Each structure stands twice: as structure tokens, then as C-alpha cells.
């Protein structure tokens, strides 16, 4: 769902998706967020990296079979906020040590990357069983969205009023009421 809400003294842009908690869903979150950021005219990095890490964490650690995770991007003034909500409120993320002398793990560095890239980040409990992990980036003034559009881009063909002419892909007209098609 793409929309822009007017707010006194500023703009709000938002983009929200429900995705499956799978590696494919995490990949789609990154790809679709990147396209949305591009449509808004915002820098892709570091936001795309933050989306990738948070979505991957939701698919890996927040997965509950049959339940999706939500990606939400929004811009308010000069702040881009990335939120990922999953249905494992009982499993809160924790920032692991980045000590170079600690034994190397295969995983566990995602939130350290988010903490390094984001200006602010945190975890907010939601209605049970949800939790939201969020990160905020302050946008430089010249990169704050300035376009005044109703949405980020076309999501369907523009409306064209009927002209009375039948397009080639339309089905034939129905017969008048009470009559059927005959082969005669």
C-alpha cells in the first residue's frame, strides 16, 4: 500500500508490505524497498542494508508458520523510518558484542550492522504476539522528498473513460435479455 498523507508543516510518505517469513520474503523486502526509495528520490544506502538485515532477522528468528512479517517505510520531514514487525514477540533481539577477540560466529552481526548504519534503532512491543524492530535515518536536507505526487508511481493503468469502441481483448457483448446466442 502506497500513500502520501498531508500533514501541517511537512510531508509523510509511507510504504507497507506483508511478506512471507522466508528467505524469498526477506529478499523481496529488500528489492521492493530499494525500488520505493528510488521512486521517492532517496539514497539507497544505507537504508537498503538496514531493510535487508531487519527482514532477514524477521524471516530467520521471527518466523511462525502461517504468519507473515510486515515491512513499513515512511518518511516524516527529514527522517526515514524502517520498521519490520514479526509475530515472535517472545524473542526480542539483542545486540551481540563486536569484540574482535570473541570467537567468530556464523551469524549474529546483523543488529551490530543496523546499529552502525542507523542514527537510531530499537525494539517496540506490539499487540501480542508481535514486536517491531525499527531503525531511523536522518536525511540530508537536499535528499528530503520534494515531489508533490499522490503516490510513488503508477500501480495500475490510468483511468480512461469508455469511448464506445470495443477493445480487441474484450469479450463479445451479451445478447439482449430473454434471448440466447443461436447458431442459426
Image: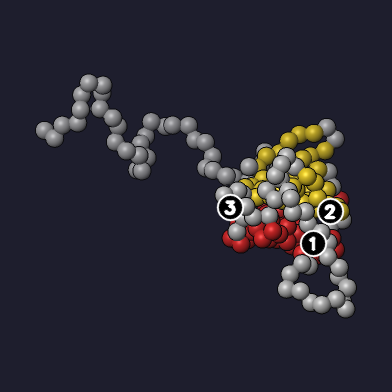
Mark 2 burial class by Cα count in 10 Å: few <14, some 14-19, many 20+:
some
Query: What residue do we see at 73% from left, 73% from top?
Result: 106
Measured as percent of width and height from the top left, residue 105 is found at 76, 74
Residue 43 visible in the picture: no
Mark 1 burial class by Cα count in 10 Å: few <14, some 14-19, many 20+:
many
Q: Earlier in the sequence, mark 1 or mark 2?
A: 1
Which residue matches tag 2? 121
Helix, strand or loop at label 2? It is strand
Q: Earlier in the sequence, mark 3 or mark 1?
A: 3
Residue in the foreground of this view, choosing between 167 and 17: 17
Spatial CA distance of label 3 from label 1 is 23 Å
Q: Earlier in the sequence, mark 3 or mark 2?
A: 3
Q: Residue furthest top?
A: 178
Q: Specify the quadrant that holds the C terminus.
A: top left
- State the scheme by which the image is colored: secondary structure
Residue in the foreground of this view, choosing between 80 and 115: 115
Query: What residue do we see at 22% from left, 21% from top?
Result: 178
Q: Are marks 1 and 2 in contact (CB under 8 Å)?
A: yes
| Vertical position of residue 129 compared to residue 104: above or below | above
Measured as percent of width and height from the top left, residue 138 is found at 85, 52
Which residue matches tag 3? 65
Query: What residue do we see at 20% from left, 24% from top?
Result: 179
Helix, strand or loop at label 3? It is loop
* Tag nearer the camera, 3 or 2: 3
Spatial CA distance of label 1 from label 2 is 9 Å
Q: Are marks 3 and 2 in contact (CB under 8 Å)?
A: no
Residue 175 visible in the picture: yes
Q: Is residue 165 left or right of residue 127?
A: left
Q: Is residue 179 left or right of residue 39?
A: left
Amino acid at each position: 500500500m502506497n500513500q502520501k498523507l498531508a500533514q501541517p508543516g511537512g510531508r509523510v510518505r509511507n510504504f507497507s508490505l506483508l511478506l512471507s517469513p522466508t528467505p524469498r520474503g526477506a529478499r523481496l523486502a529488500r528489492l521492493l524497498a530499494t525500488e520505493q526509495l528510488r521512486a521517492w528520490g532517496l539514497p539507497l544506502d544505507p537504508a537498503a542494508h538496514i531493510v535487508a538485515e531487519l527482514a532477514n532477522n524477521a524471516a530467520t528468528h521471527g518466523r511462525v508458520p502461517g504468519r507473515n512479517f510486515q515491512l513499513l517505510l515512511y518518511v516524516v520531514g527529514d527522517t526515514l523510518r524502517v520498521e519490520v514487525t514479526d509475530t515472535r514477540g517472545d524473542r526480542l533481539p539483542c545486540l551481540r558484542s563486536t569484540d574482535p577477540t570473541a570467537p567468530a560466529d556464523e551469524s549474529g552481526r546483523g543488529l551490530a550492522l543496523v546499529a552502525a548504519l542507523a542514527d537510531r534503532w530499537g525494539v517496540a512491543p506490539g499487540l501480542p504476539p508481535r514486536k517491531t524492530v525499527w531503525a531511523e535515518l536522518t536525511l540530508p536536507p537536499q535528499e528530503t522528498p520534494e515531489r508533490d505526487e499522490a503516490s510513488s508511481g503508477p500501480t495500475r493503468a490510468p483511468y480512461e473513460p469508455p469511448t464506445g469502441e470495443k477493445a480487441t481483448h474484450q469479450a463479445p457483448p451479451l445478447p439482449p435479455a430473454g434471448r440466447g446466442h443461436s447458431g442459426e
